[in-house]
Image (cartoon, coloured by chain):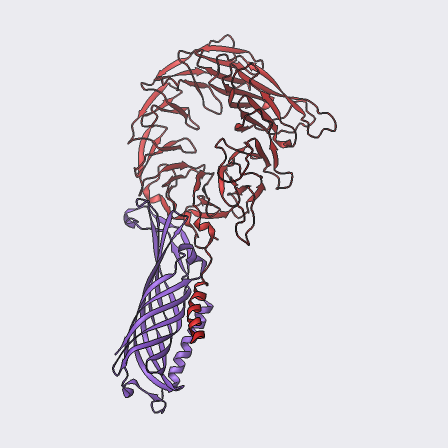
Amino acid sequence: MRPALFATLLVPLAVAACTADRPPELDRPRSLLGPVPLKDRVAWVDTALDRVVALDLTGDAPHVEAIPIGHNAVYATPSSDRDHLLVITRGEEALQRGRQDEPPQLFDVDLAHPDTAPIAFAVGSPFDRIAVSGDDHIAVAYFSQAGPDDSGFFRNPNEMAFVDLDQQPTDANPVLKTLRAFGTTPTGVVLSPPMSVPNADDPSPRTFAFVFSHNVVTLVDCDHADRAEVSLRLDTAGASIDPQEVVFAPASSTAYLRSNGARDVLQVILDSDPPVKGDTHANDYRPLLAELGAGGGPADIAVFDDIHSKRWVIAATPTTSEVVVIDTDTAQFRRVQTPDPIDRISLFPPDAPTVAVLASLGSGLPRVQLMPLDQLSNPLASITLSQVDLGKPVRDVVPVPGRELAMVVHDDDRTVLSLLDVTFGSVSPLDGVGRLDSYAFTATGDYLVGTAAGVSRLGFLDLSNLHPSDLRLDSPPARVLALANGKIVAEDNDPVGRVTIIPGAGATRDQAIVLDGFLLTDVLQEH
Amino acid sequence: MSRTLVLASSLVCALATAARAQPADAPAIADSAHRGDPGWRLELGSETRWLHDSSAAAVTTDPFVSTALSVARDLMAIEMFRGVLDLGAEVTWTNGSATGQMFQTLGTTVGDNEWLGGLRAAWRPRRHVSVTGRASAGVTRTDLFIAPLDAPTMASVDDHRWGRVATASLGVELDAVHVPSFALGVGVELGYVETSAVTMHAYPSDRPDPNASIETAYASIGHLDLDGWSLRIGVHAAF
């Protein structure tokens, strides 16, 4: 009987061994990066299933697209045109026989053409931030200040990857670079619009990266990232300087830098500086620095071109209760006394500003000042501010796209709001059901759409006549997104995925559609 | 579905064998009444199925455990190979489930109810010992439930679908009691269960009345296939 006994014992064991291997992706902790609103899609990155899940909202019915990417996504950001999604993946080590090491990569996912395979750039390190140029030509991957995590051994916070998104990945693309450091680490990266260096042998427009660090701004020519970077020390006068904001005048290859701790706005002009022949790593430009006399430490700056194409910089210096208007062609400036310590400048309309709204957010004063911009070029014309009393403290000023309106937030919880009509200086208070947890302006700027936690409604405000309306939903949304194609998406923050898609402001429940469970699309096969 | 074809072929062969054994005057054939053996049979068992499709592995790593209840009627007995081959028809109902997790945050439960009809053959070389074989086919209702763990207020999704199922098995039975008109014993069977893949969708468990809610589309979770080898242990009574 022994063979029969053995057989009796072995057969069930052999049968049990016939079970399928479980994909390890299903046992990972899962987090979702997103939702990321794109032009006509909304995307999430699933860090467990290693895929981008996008809702295609171009048609009447939503369509779910799942696009595989590398392992362990850590960061995602849309391209400037909002057709692509850029995702950094950490990769993984091969812990089992048969699996392969995967290095950190930056994936360029073309969601406008989801059938196109994502382009993977080997960025070398698991960066967790991406800066993208306005023309989507350059992406710079860098580390945030979150510090090292439990993966990896060494971490070089001054390392960056400069990726030419218009070129295929090669050994020379991306360029990995460790910036010269002075005991500091980057706090942010801003990419310039394409700028030509005047009088340079190479007149082509290029993108420059302005890398902020404590006391240092570093410039990198992203189109020639293999060339040496240029470091600008900001602390030569002994002050402690933290660069905060840079605005550009691409026509004149100029940038204006605002820093905490600095007395003035720093003007950075890129000028031709032919390199020594044979030095392939030398730059063909040099930055010329000038301090524009803001005085008092600017808290906010804004730049705009007037109708004569003259570029102006406006800097607010709350310590001196002034606003300084700087003619960037001549560096001449005018000081405008303000009754309040201004620390926020908003321009209206944003594309061709005629009025600047000056607010004092830090002081929480219940008023704003309106400064006309149409007479700046006339040195004889005085600049007169007009005050608009709002009745309640101002905590934030949010421009409405495409309109000369600003949404004014009066408390930190966004429960008290008003709309400021910049043209007339009128203020309309808004009453709501509670805290405005999520809001968006429709692409045309015609409507403000908002949600409040636990409320199964979307609130609409027609910005042409301030007529409120709402749409009852089947479940309370966590956030609302307004897409460029006019559609509105209310997202429920549900781990299996649930959104309500409204074809546009003013639509009825009959025209809306709910999509459920899309974050589990093909989860049983997706391995 | 190649395995389904094999199982179907087995079933057809078994039926053909039974049909060939039909002549009533054949000397090797005797109905059970002539021999005084029980004609009806009731079986209660526990079946463990090791699922081997990757879609099943996505929702559970545990074996699929079912309760099986069968009722059979012996149709004829054939004396062969120094024993008696009983042929009968049976109907079986099984109900089982398995649980698992996804992403460490979602709990999964997969269940099914199967209704099967088929043939059963038992060759008894000795009075208390039988070697059995079954071939059955029928329908199955597969249920899938996915809910966030530790977040009972979050929405869960579930779905159920009807599909086809076919099984075949071989086993051994031992009768503790075997007297005319009654038998009682235990048995063990090793078999294979073939199911058709069913497409599951993410239907919310708390979905509102469709007439009072916004038109809703439900994403496809994918195809779920509960194929696998099975081991059934049960007790039976015949009378």
Q: Tell me where residue B167 appears, x and y as whole percent.
A: 39, 70
Compared with residue B173, is residue A440 higher up or lower down, i.e. above or below?
above
Q: Tell me where residue A333 appears, x and y as whole percent.
A: 53, 11
The color chain B is rendered in: purple
- The residue under the point 39% across, 19% down is A362
Compared with residue A32, is residue B187 higher up or lower down, i.e. above or below?
below
Q: Quadrant of residue A141?
A: top right
Residue A32 visible from this viewpoint: yes
Which residue of the protein is positioned furthest toward the front in this rendering?
Answer: A2
Q: Quadrant of residue A140?
A: top right
> How many marks are shown on the rendered structure?
0
Quadrant of the drawing holding the N terminus of chain A: bottom left
Compared with residue A526, is residue B176 higher up or lower down, i.e. above or below?
below
- Residue A387 or residue A403, whichever sits in front: A387
- The residue under the point 49% across, 20% down is A302
- The residue under the point 41% across, 86% down is B81
Which residue of the protein is positioned furthest toward the right in this rendering?
Answer: A277
Left or right of residue B99, residue A3 in this image: right
Compared with residue A462, is residue B72 higher up or lower down, i.e. above or below?
below
Residue A373 visible from this viewpoint: no
Left or right of residue B69, residue B61 in this image: right
Q: Tell me where residue B123 appears, x and y as whole percent.
A: 37, 81
Supply the letter of whichever chain is red. A
- Residue A9 or residue A324, whichever sits in front: A9
Q: Quadrant of residue B55?
A: bottom left
Q: Tell me where residue B164 appears, x and y as whole percent.
A: 38, 66
